[in-house]
Image (cartoon, helix red, strand yellow):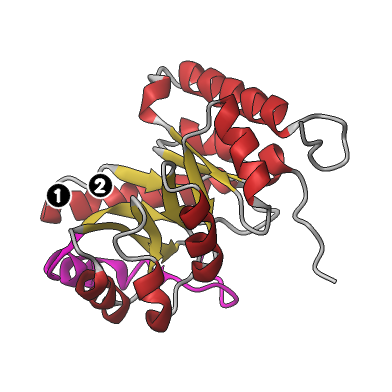
Amino acid sequence: MTAAGGTGATIAERWREVRARVDAACRAASRDPDEVTLIAVSKTHPASAVREAAAAGATDFGENYAQELAAKRGELPELRWHFIGRLQRNKAKLVAGHVVLVHAVDSLDLAAELGKRAAAVQSMLLAVNIAGETTKGGVSEADAPALARAVAGTANVRLDGLMTMPPPGDDPRRHFDALRALRDRLAADLGPLPVLSMGMSGDFEAAIACGATHVRIGTAIFGERPRVE
């Protein structure tokens, strides 16, 4: 069993603890725990760590880098993979059709490339820079409706909702509430957008209270990312 983050806890123990916290947050918000998908973010961690989390019950895993995703998916094709990072168009072929959900589409060109490369309809989310941070990618709240309409009309893709990441040190709830309100406005125009991907290791309980359907948890499960020498 692998110790995570140098604390003595194993990855399996950490995953079970996080799963229990997700379930408790759902109950506190009068929600069914089955409504929330827990994505174990395994970027830069080895396939052996993914196997340990999967053995403990994890089913959904998130990767930020296309080539790393391809390598791990090749070793563990039975798992449900999500792509949660920023994606360059020239790497779309490594992702399209190989993941259940692309979380961070921020341009029509990228959506079209994913649709072109996927053998079946590719599910995706718009990445919304809800706080308007200049250091982050994602479409602005003001530009999201036009992009959502364009993506919804793109061949071989399905727009299923929105994702965001609030600024560190800020109250995440106001950003989560803003994303949910934006989703509701878009859904009134475009039809159902069931997915809200928001919440990470430090704020997932607040995200669940605000309506998150997918939470992306890395450090709390796998510990600190390995250092690259």
Q: Which of 25 and 118 is in front in this view?
A: 118
In the image, what residue type sits under mark 1?
A: Ala
Residue stretch in magenta: 131-158
Query: Marks 2/1: CA distance?
Result: 6 Å
Q: Nearer the viewer, residue 164 or 3?
A: 3
Image: 145 above or below 173: below
Task: Look at the numbered disc 2 and give the secondary structure of its residue.
Answer: helix
Residue 100 in the image, given as x and y percentages of width and height = 33, 50
Task: Look at the numbered disc 1 and give the secondary structure of its residue.
Answer: helix
Q: Does the magenta stretch include residue 138?
A: yes
Image: 99 above or below 60: below
Quarter of the image containing the N terminus?
Answer: top right
Label 2: few (<14), some (14–19) or many (≥20) C-alpha neighbours in 10 Å: some
Q: Does the image show residue 132?
A: no
Residue 123 has which mark? none
Residue denoted by label 1: 188
Q: Residue at x 40, y 36 (%)?
A: 211
Q: Residue at x 78, y 57 (%)?
A: 226
Q: Residue at x 17, y 45 (%)?
A: 192
Label 1: few (<14), some (14–19) or many (≥20) C-alpha neighbours in 10 Å: few
Q: Does the image show residue 121?
A: yes
Image: 227 above or below 54: below
Residue 132 in the image, given as x and y percentages of width and height = 50, 70
Residue 184 has which mark? 2
